[in-house]
Structure formats: structure tokens, C-alpha cells
């Protein structure tokens, strides 16, 4: 019985292995991060925290003196522009220490 099985295995045709790509991923270009805000009379700290998340800033330090409320409507505005608009509106400035830390304080 072993010989019969061996004979069958030997007579089976050999198939070449072929590589199939399923859903090949096309190279993508990194899309710049943007901010979308639609807020009315929102606390500046909440606005800045929302922008922090949308711009993938890991750490955001907000000075205790930073306060106020604002109304903004932005749609897919680049992060740098959005921060510039919000900071100027509230009379604030920011200091970037690295790609993962930004500090916001009152202008003097």
C-alpha cells in the first residue's frame, strides 16, 4: 500500500508557485494635517485642545492666564494657519520646543 501511494505522489504534475498580490497598496503621499472647527462662544482652552488632537501634537502646555471665548468656522485649514488665526484672535503666542511640544501663553 505504501508503494501505491508513493507512485501516485510521484506521478502528480509539479506546479510552479506563483505569487498573487491581493489589493496591492499604491504609494501614497502624506496629506498635511488640517483643522476643522465650527464653534460658537467656545472656551479657548477647549479650542486649543481640539486643535492639538487634529494636528497630532502630543503635548500642549497652556499658561493658566490664557482664557476667553471665541467663535470660529474653519474647514480643512492647515494646522500652522489655524493656530496663527486662533492665537492672533486671542492675543496669544506659542513657543514650539519640538515636534511634540507646543506652549501657549499670553502676549506681554
Image (cartoon, grey):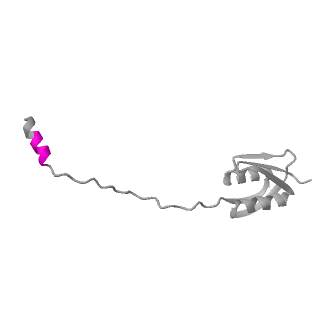
Q: Is residue 61 magenta?
A: no
Q: Quadrant of residue 34?
A: bottom right
Task: Report the front residue among 8 and 74.
Answer: 8
Q: Quadrant of residue 42?
A: bottom right
Is residue 5 shown above or below 24? above
Left or right: 1, with 106 as reference point = left
Q: Is residue 10 part of the magenta span, yes or no?
A: yes
Residue at screen point 69% across, 62% down = 78
Q: Outermost residue toward the right?
A: 108
Q: What is the quadrant of the N terminus in the image?
A: top left
Pinpoint residue 56: horizontal percent, then vertical percent.
Answer: 67, 51
The residue range painted magenta reads 5-11
**Numbered circles on residues, count:** 0
Residue drawn 11% across the image and 44% down it: 8
- Name the residue nearer the viewer: 7 or 103: 7
Query: Is 52 displayed left or right of 16 in the figure?
Result: right
Residue 10: image x %, image y %?
13, 45
Q: Position of residue 55 (x, y in %)?
A: 68, 54
Q: Quadrant of residue 22?
A: bottom left
Q: Residue at x 79, y 60 (%)?
A: 84
Could you say where residue 63 lies in the image, as x and y percent from the top left?
84, 46
User: Going by the image, does 5 lie left or right of 67?
Assistant: left
The prevailing secondary structure element of the residues shown in magenta is: helix
Amino acid at each position: 500500500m505504501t508503494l501505491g501511494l508513493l507512485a501516485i505522489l510521484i506521478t502528480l504534475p509539479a506546479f510552479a508557485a506563483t505569487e498573487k498580490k491581493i489589493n496591492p497598496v499604491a504609494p501614497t503621499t502624506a496629506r498635511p494635517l488640517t483643522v476643522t472647527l465650527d464653534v460658537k462662544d467656545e472656551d479657548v482652552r477647549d479650542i486649543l485642545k481640539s486643535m492639538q488632537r487634529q494636528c497630532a501634537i502630543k503635548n500642549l502646555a497652556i499658561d493658566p492666564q490664557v482664557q476667553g471665548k471665541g467663535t470660529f468656522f474653519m474647514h480643512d485649514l492647515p494646522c500652522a494657519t489655524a493656530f496663527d488665526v486662533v492665537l492672533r484672535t486671542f492675543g496669544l503666542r506659542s513657543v514650539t520646543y519640538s515636534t511634540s511640544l507646543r506652549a501657549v501663553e499670553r502676549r506681554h
